[in-house]
């Protein structure tokens, strides 16, 4: 009897030690039963169905500079360099994108800003094209990544030709075989138009070469 009571007492003591652990286990199981369906539902909502393909937005294509385009002249850097605002259709947008493109007039060379007639050449270019819609016909790019182009004015005249005709640009013979520009320069010389009032005007390519040698 003594052994039996001792045995029962020991069992009661063991149960008392295990009771908090059992409570913790039961509580954890209850919490798991409550939140497990919620977690599973949330996971299913985030995971796309294999039967339904995901809606993919096509990647945005990088903007490419157009070869030939129309746009408004928004800047005149000097006699033979202008900036034209090209309006491109947005690839994935309802709003067109406006891209300023620097354009170097092909086959001609105007006096540099520090040269005689440099500012007058810039003024002549502004008078002909600034804030007007023009057509840019590309002939490639120069080493400064500017578009080399013939620029068509609203009335159909060619800006490059008009500057040579007025005597504010040389025919850039090194990079051109254009007989029209050759003829226009000859006429401007004969009429002493623009810079040709000087007896021996310095071509801008020689002016640049001289300026670099002094640096």
Image (cartoon, rainbow, N blue to C red):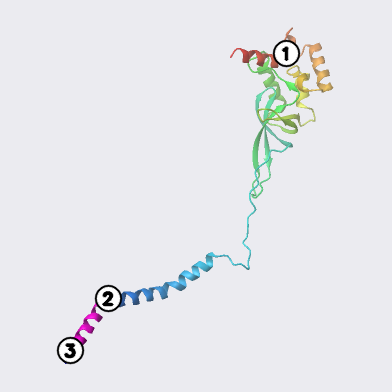
Query: Mostly what secondary structure, the magenta segment?
Result: helix
- Say which of marks 3 and 2 sits in front: 3
Rendered position, 211 above or below 138: above
Q: Where is mark 1, residue-wise?
A: 195
Instruction: In the rendered structure, find residue 3 and report the number of the disc placed on it.
Output: 3
Element type at mark 1: helix
Q: Earlier in the sequence, mark 3 or mark 1?
A: 3
Secondary structure beneath label 2 = helix
Q: Position of residue 44 (x, y in %)?
A: 53, 68
Q: Is residue 63 above or below residue 1?
A: above
Which segment did they paint magenta? 5-20
Q: CA distance from mark 3 to mark 2?
A: 28 Å
Q: Earlier in the sequence, mark 2 or mark 1?
A: 2
Say which residue label 2 marks: 20
- At label 3, counting other C-alpha atoms closer than 10 Å, the crowd grade (few under 14, some 14-19, many 20 or more) is few
Q: In what quadrant of the picture does the N terminus appear?
A: bottom left
């Amino acid at each position: 009897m003594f052994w039996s009571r001792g045995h029962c007492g020991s069992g009661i003591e063991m149960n008392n030690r295990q009771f908090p652990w059992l409570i913790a286990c039961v509580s954890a199981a209850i919490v798991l039963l409550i939140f497990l369906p919620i977690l599973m539902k949330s996971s299913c909502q985030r995971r796309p169905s294999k039967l339904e393909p995901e809606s993919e937005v096509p990647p945005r294509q990088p903007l490419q500079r157009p070869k030939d385009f129309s746009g408004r002249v928004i800047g005149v850097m000097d006699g033979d360099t202008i900036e034209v605002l090209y309006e491109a259709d947005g690839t994935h947008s309802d709003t067109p994108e406006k891209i300023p493109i620097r354009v170097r007039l092909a086959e001609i060379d105007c006096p540099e800003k520090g040269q005689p007639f440099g500012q007058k050449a810039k003024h002549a270019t502004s008078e002909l094209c600034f804030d007007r819609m023009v057509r840019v016909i590309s002939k490639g790019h120069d080493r400064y990544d500017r578009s080399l182009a013939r620029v068509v004015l609203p009335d159909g005249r060619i800006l490059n030709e008009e500057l040579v005709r007025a005597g504010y640009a040389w025919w850039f013979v090194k990079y051109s075989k254009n007989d029209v520009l050759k003829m226009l320069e000859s006429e401007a010389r004969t009429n002493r138009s623009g810079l040709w009032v000087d007896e021996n005007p310095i071509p801008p390519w020689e002016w640049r070469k001289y300026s670099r040698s002094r640096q």
